[in-house]
Amino acid sequence: MGRPQQLPLAGLLLLSLLPSQLCTICKVSKENYSLLNPLISTMVNSKYAGGIQAANVLLSLKLAGVDHQSLEKQLIQEAKYIEEKKESNLTSGQLALAILALRACQNPNESDKHLQLVSQLEEKFREEIEHMGVPGGNPKTNYYQLSLAVLALCLFNGSYSITELNTYFTPENKNFYFGGRFSVDTGAMAVLALSCVEKSVRQTDTNGEDLQNIKNYTESLAKKILSEKKENGLLGNAFSTGQAMQALFVSSAYYKEKEWNCQQTLDTVLEEISQGTFHLPIAAAQVLPALMGKTYLDVNNYSSCANNSGLFNSSTPEPTTPVEPTSPSTWISVNYTVQIQETFSIEVTVPKGSVFLNVMEEAQKMNYTVFRFSFVDSMWGPYITSVEGLEENRENRTYWQLLSGGEPLKEGCGNYVVHNRDYLEVRWSKY
Ligand code: B12
């Protein structure tokens, strides 16, 4: 039975006063769109081997209203590949991203396929919850992905239990923190998911206590994000800011206007763009929607891809010039340390412009037993999984942390450019 499409005026007025309807959004003005070109270039000029990265980029471009038909076709093709292969080895977050991207480009007569993917996601979400069943248990992946899964299930009528969300999404849960520090990216994704849940709970008759808890969690997470605001306006770091902005857009009922100067944050992100900070397609994809005032909750408002309905058309802008490796004739010397219980250090000489990974490779050549390592490729580049034969372990929340001068790096080993006399370290750590 269809629901009445028109609400009485009084109802509309009331709705417009509900907290979830309030929204503070700042976005790049039309005359400044060209400042976003480096992001768009990065995304449209990259080759996408993995479907998930393609899905991320497609989602971002679509939300931002950037039309680039040939890329969209290529990306949709890749995303469909995931769908048809029914990849069971996709993680919950990867599948959720694929669903969001496909939905952003949905062809109305393909909704059946979409339904199948949503039920696969329900299954993966169940597995995550079961994994946490034991006291102190962890999800199979992490809370960033769990939140992506809840978001996709909520947006596309998948089933999930509000009671379980109430149990597991308390802002004090250890999975919101890495090494005792609040993860802004994770908190932001959770706020987006919970905001969607809040809206849908309002529309059903679920008891008031559930709704109140969801609101309390959203408020507390939004406050935690704000408490990670830096002097220059960044929320966490440059790579978490786009998602944190999305979270603050949808949760503006829970903080005071003066608590966040959105324009300052936006200006600093634009400055970071001009410095080449978002040179990886995934980094560009994560930051772009917020700069256009969009959030992942807007996915449902899009029609099929390649329909030319975008805000601006991107005719493959000039690629950004990547940071040129300096002439290898200049060599630099760095100190490299592996720290487990004992500490093993070595002096390594590499060409200027080398990245952390090059140092690790050089050290491995010099002393294989101590400095051998392995990595897997990911959207953010190579991710170190083991050093000296010691593997990271998700159950125990152990991993190999990268540091320079004792400070954790903000980039991975494939991107951090080392400098002369750098003091590099891979440290066996807990998160
Ligand atoms: C969860 C997470 C972690 C977990 C991963 C393990 C787990 N339990 O899942 C832990 C805490 C171990 C971790 C470690 C690191 N992380 Co991390 N992480 C994230 C987070 C919050 C979510 C990733 C995710 O699940 N994405 C969704 C799924 C669907 O995508 P995915 O590609 O399949 O996800 C995998 C990869 O992202 C990989 N991964 C996670 N972090 C990193 C970092 C790098 C550099 C690489 C190459 C891969 C990688 O693990 C994910 C799960 O398998 C992101 C936030 C974000 N904005 O993306 C940061 C993020 C990706 N991490 C980041 C960083 C810097 C790191 C570290 C380098 C920190 C350090 N100084 O040691 C290390 C990696 C070191 C190494 N061994 O190579 C940055 C990357 C920025 C950049 N420009 O490169 C991000 C964006 C956070 C931020 N805002 O700064 N991370």
Image (cartoon, rainbow, N blue to C red):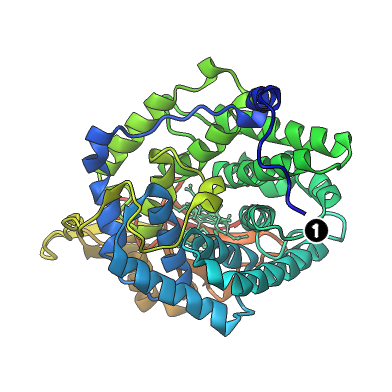
Q: Residue at x 38, y 40 (%)?
A: 292
Res. 47 image quadrant: bottom left
Residue 53 to residue 267: above or below: below
Is residue 138 visible to the viewer in this orientation of the structure?
Answer: yes
Res. 180 image quadrant: top right
**Residue 75 % position (x, y):** 39, 70
Establish whether ligand 1 lies closer than 8 Å to the Cβ of label 1: no
Whether residue 54 sits left or right of residue 31 in the image: it is right
Pick the front one: 125 or 415: 125
Whether residue 428 sits left or right of residue 19 in the image: it is left
Specify the quadrant that holds the N terminus: bottom right
**Residue 69 % position (x, y):** 30, 65
Q: Residue at x 20, y 58 (%)?
A: 315
**Residue 213 % position (x, y):** 81, 35
Pick the front one: 406 or 311: 311
Residue 313 to residue 205: above or below: below
Pick the front one: 307 or 34: 307
Q: Residue at x 53, y 77 (%)?
A: 82
> Quick one: which residue is furthest to the bottom in this view?
85
Near mark 1 (Cα within 10 A), the count class, few <14, some 14-19 or many ≥20, is some
> Quick one: which residue is furthest to the top in this view?
258
Res. 26 image quadrant: top left
SS class, disc 1? loop
**Residue 187 % position (x, y):** 62, 42
Q: Badge 1 is on which residue? A: 137
Three-letter amino acid code at disc 1? Gly
Residue 339 to residue 18: above or below: below
Is residue 340 visible to the viewer in this orientation of the structure?
Answer: no
Pick the front one: 384 or 221: 221
Count all numbered tags in the image, as a single digit: 1
Q: Residue at x 47, y 30 (%)?
A: 25
